[in-house]
Image (spheres, rainbow, N blue to C red):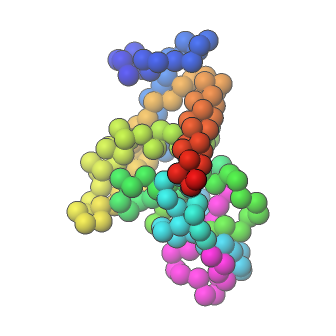
Amino acid sequence: MSNKMTPNVRFEGFTDAWEQRKLKEIVQINPKTNIPNSFEYVDLDSVKGTHLRKYRLETKAGAPSRAQRLAKKGDIFYQMVRPYQKNNYLFQDKTGDNFVFSTGYAQLRPSISSTFLLSVLQQQSFVNHVMAISTGTSYPAVNASDLARLHILVPTSVGEMELIGTVISHCDDIIAHHQRH
């Protein structure tokens, strides 16, 4: 990135400057919700990379106390413990409103393109910033309020933002497919 806040490489047809924004300006963090009586529970071991590998059926009465984050399509779940693992998930391909994630994730509900935001959160430069504000050595962790204060660069063009997110998401899917086969 140059000082003029635009990337060095751009998709053809996009020339608008990007803007620096605090994460808390573009996402709602850990929105309050009511947990259903029965749900699919996603813990920290359930996500590998950007893919949901497993989940289990739980009841409200028998669930772990960390089962608190009710997913909505477009939410990003950011792993707050050992963020260097980049095990972050964009909830978009599951049906139903009964997926509940652990409080080990920060639930981010973006007002911008979810696919674009996930691509930014997965960048090593962002992870380096997160690690710089994390506490602990064996299990470094970041809290949601510190995460909310981090800055990212965002295109002012919604079209550019969506195109970037779509291309990176597609590449990630291709990589995951080849790793499975």
Residue located at (61% from left, 38% from top):
170
Quarter of the image where one finds residue 26? top right
Could you tell whether 93 is left or right of 82 in the image?
right
Q: Quick check: 95 left or right of 105?
A: right
In the visual, does 1 lie left or right of 176?
A: left
Q: Residue furthest front?
A: 181
Q: Is residue 116 above or below residue 51?
A: above
Q: Which residue is pictured at 43% across the width and 52% down the height?
A: 86
Q: Residue furthest left?
A: 137
Identify the residue at horizontal 23%, vertical 63% (top origin): 137
In front of the other: 49 or 122: 49
Residue 143 seen = no
Quadrant position of residue 128: top left
| Residue 96, percent from left and from top | 76, 63
The quadrant of the rendering that contains the N terminus is: top left
**Which stretch appears magenta?**
56-73
For the question of whether residue 179 can be seen, the reply is yes
For image coordinates 35% across by 17% down, the residue present is 3
Residue 63 among those drawn in magenta = yes
